[in-house]
Image (cartoon, rainbow, N blue to C red):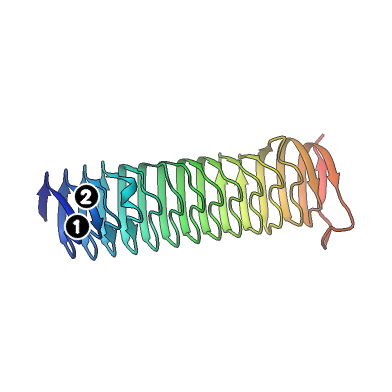
Amino acid sequence: MKTISNEEFGGERPLFASHDLRLENVTIHAGESALKECSNIEAINCRFEGKYPFWHVDKFFIKDCLFTEGARAALWYSRNLVMKDTLVEAPKMFREMENLDIENVKIPNALETLWHCKGVKLKKVEIDKADYLFMHTDDIEIEDYKQQGNYSFQYSHNVTIRNAEIYSKDAFWGTENVTVYDSIIIGEYLGWHSKNLRLVNCRIGGTQALCYAKGLVLENCTLDADADLCFEYSDVNADIKGHVTSIKNPSSGKIIADSVGEIIIDENIKQPANCEIIIRK
């Protein structure tokens, strides 16, 4: 493997179609597509300032690097990425990618990040300003995770999340086969139109939570006081610890809680309209 150390590059495609290359203490200045159409690339303690540095790349390792805001849309159409101990200030990262392993990474401006990806592992990752995160992304494993940003995980499939704090309006809309363990999920309209969403040992907040869902399961969860008008038109099996502010028109299943402030069953309930609501004694 060839090594380039302590150098600076800029302009258009300075390292285009490179293979078996290690970059150490390298700066990529303003320009475009510095490492396009490459394979087997290592970048250690590097700084990326130009747009689109890693497009159409197969097998690359990134550690202790910085992607500045100017390096927007830095990693697209690529596969087999390992990224560790890195700061990503650039928006619109990780599009149309496969097999991503991301650990101890901070992404403070994650607008429209992780779209149309498959095979994503995140561990010890912090994400902010993350509107529309994980759009149409499948096969996700997440652990020790913090996120601020709305409309996340829309239309994602096969997701497992452990020990997370997720603050996101409209999270998990239209998802399928999602399980969340030991986490905090705060945001309005959680899980609408989802299929097989399972929440285990979770704290849930935000109005009109978990409506229009099919195959919804809650195990040993708690609901904040603002989590009202829950479960409308949902097929749900829920074991809730503590108080529920209000439940409205669940379609089927069973809901068990310690107490419920208001149960709203009106003429608009959808069939089969046979959900059992049990107050634990």
**Element on which disc 1 rests:** strand
Q: Few, some or many C-alpha atoms within 10 Å of disc 2 (few <14, some 14-19, many ≥20)?
A: some
Along the viewing direction, whichever of 52 and 193 lies nearer the viewer: 52
Residue displayed at 22% across by 59% down: 35
Along the viewing direction, whichever of 82 and 152 lies nearer the viewer: 152
Horizontal side, residue 247 vs residue 70: left or right: right
Along the viewing direction, whichever of 280 and 197 lies nearer the viewer: 197
Q: Using the image, tell me which numbered label, if any, was put on residue 193.
A: none
Q: Position of residue 190 (x, y in %)?
A: 64, 49
Along the viewing direction, whichever of 253 and 231 lies nearer the viewer: 231
Amino acid carrying mark 1 in the image: Gly
Q: Position of residue 251 (x, y in %)?
A: 79, 57
Q: Quadrant of the C terminus?
A: top right
Amino acid carrying mark 2 in the image: His
Q: Position of residue 155 (x, y in %)?
A: 55, 61
Residue displayed at 72% across by 51% down: 237
Q: Quadrant of the N terminus?
A: bottom left
Most distant residue in the right direction: 267
Instruction: List the residue tagged with mark 2.
Output: 29
**Element on which disc 2 rests:** strand
Q: How far apart are the two marked residues, 2 and 1, measured between alpha carbons?
A: 7 Å
Say which quarter of the image contains residue 52.
Answer: bottom left
Q: Using the image, tell me which numbered label, if any, was put on residue 11.
A: 1
Q: Few, some or many C-alpha atoms within 10 Å of disc 1 (few <14, some 14-19, many ≥20)?
A: few
Q: Are marks 2 and 1 in contact (CB under 8 Å)?
A: yes
Q: Position of residue 261 (x, y in %)?
A: 82, 37
Q: Earlier in the sequence, mark 2 or mark 1?
A: 1
Say which quarter of the image contains residue 109.
Answer: top left
Residue displayed at 39% across by 63% down: 96
Q: Is residue 19 above or below residue 254?
A: below
Residue displayed at 57% across by 58% down: 177
